[in-house]
Amino acid sequence: MPESSSRKTKKAEKVKVKTEKTPKKPRTQSRVWVAPLMLACWLLGLAWLVVFYVAGQDIPVMNDLGNWNLLIGMGLIAVGFVVSTQWV
């Protein structure tokens, strides 16, 4: 069967030559803020958990939060791990 002219133009459009892009240079140095923020999140999360277990009953805000303190401490540690993926 003969092909219609619209099919022929669609085939011609699909065969376009892609221009080559120059590849990006990989980072060789880490950003300055990554390591301090990562360590701060880890240490703050650890300190939050330790304070909760040691003196959580005596601190009004921690006493009101209850077991949500575990989520806050572990969340800070998890944020530290997420930030650590930016470190080269």
Image (cartoon, rainbow, N blue to C red):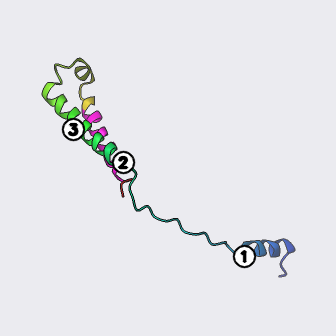
Q: CA distance from mark 2 to mark 3?
A: 18 Å
Q: Which mark is residue 15?
A: 1
Q: Position of residue 84 (x, y in %)?
A: 33, 51
Q: Residue at x 33, y 43 (%)?
A: 37
Q: Quadrant of residue 46?
A: top left
Neighbours of disc 2 within 10 Å: few (<14), some (14-19), many (20+): some
Q: Residue at x 24, y 40 (%)?
A: 43
Q: Which mark is residue 46?
A: 3
Q: Nearer the viewer, mark 3 or mark 1?
A: 3
Task: Specify start and end residues of the magenta stretch as a single range.
Answer: 70-85
How many numbered marks have been drawn onto this rendered protein structure?
Answer: 3
Main secondary structure along the magenta-highlighted residues: helix
Secondary structure type for disc 2: helix
Q: Nearer the viewer, mark 1 or mark 2?
A: 2
User: In this figure, which residue is indicated by the disc labeled 2?
Assistant: 34
Q: Nearer the viewer, residue 47 or 56?
A: 47
Q: CA distance from mark 1 to mark 2?
A: 45 Å
